[in-house]
Image: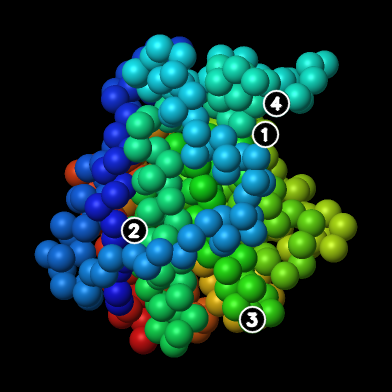
Amino acid sequence: MKTVYSEDHRLHAARMELIEGTLKPAVEKPERAEIVLARIRETGLGPVEPPREFGTEPLGRVHDARYLAFLERAWEMWTASGRDYEALPLVWAIRGLRAVEPEAIDGKLSYFSMDAGTPITAGTWAAARASANVALTATAMVRDGARAAFGLCRPPGHHAAADYYGGYCFLNNAAIAAQWLRDQGAARVSVLDVDYHHGNGTQAIFYERADVQFVSLHGDPRTEYPFFLGYADETGAGAGEGYTINYPMPFGTTYDVWGAALDDACGKVAGYAPDAVVVSLGVDTFERDPISHFKLTTPDFLQIGRRIARLGRPTVFLMEGGYAVEEIGINTVNVLTGFEEEA
């Protein structure tokens, strides 16, 4: 299996983030991608290639133009106000307040974000652009006939919606890939999200559409980030009714329960009969992940890959979460190896 990787991910290297009411060292850091890459090379999974440049048009097919303009200029505006440290938002337009885009950068950060734990740095826009190109290059490989390809995306993407960022995500790589496949002629695409946290951004983008199915296994939003999407009764709206499927699960979930949910989810994907599957591959379901609460073990990730392979569909794997950096490479490559083994 080919991997697509860009060294430009290192341009986004936040020092601190707001966690549990205090500033702490960022857990979404460059080492994540580098450890996965090292494991790919160690195991001989397949060749590693740089991304192609796809321009901004595929981004605009998913994201609002004002939001993209904000991301491109955010650091420039932030530093023009006299600050050279990570840009974090301050206040949100919640119930009773007006959702009007402010002129000041502090207001814009709040207007276009969903949390205070996703810093913007000098290289965030360039890194996010490169991450989207990684996703699109891997997707093009599959469009051109590869059984599967892996986009080693960083920053991740599935929490970013059409017009807001958060959860360490700025551009929604999985949504950009799925939309690109549709624009290239695919009649139906399934996005299968196996990250510990619900892919709220991906769900929001496709919630009223029947041409992209969204299926997610994740921590129960009653007790887990992002809290405000991911309930089982969210099944789509309008033309999209029935094409969103959520599997929220409680703290401490082990593979016997999680794997049964995956099996059911894959049954739903098979029934939809997509032309391709985009997998939001988070490995933060791991038992020792520092910010998650499931109990999957390293061998379980082989089983995940094998089950997805049995769908028999062209498959794009795109990196999302996973923060136990010592094991992130092993667990990620286990999924890909499991997929390859199930020929």
Residue labelled with disc 4: 101
Mark 4 vs mark 1, CA separation in Å: 22 Å
Which circle marks residue 145 in the picture?
none
Q: Earlier in the sequence, mark 1 or mark 2?
A: 2
Mark 3 vs mark 4, CA separation in Å: 36 Å
Quarter residue 2 falls in: bottom left
Which circle marks residue 152 in the picture?
2
Name which residue type carries label 2.
Leu
In this rendered view, identify the residue nearer to me: 40 or 78.
Answer: 78
Residue labelled with disc 3: 185
Q: How is the image coloured?
A: rainbow
Residue labelled with disc 1: 228
Quarter residue 67 falls in: top right
Mark 2 vs mark 3, CA separation in Å: 24 Å
In this rendered view, identify the residue nearer to me: 162 or 57.
Answer: 57
Quarter of the image that includes the N terminus: bottom left
Camera-near label (4 vs 2) is 4
Whether pointer 1 and pointer 2 mark residues with C-beta atoms closer than 8 Å, the reply is no
In this rendered view, identify the residue nearer to me: 230 or 145.
Answer: 145
Mark 4 vs mark 2, CA separation in Å: 33 Å
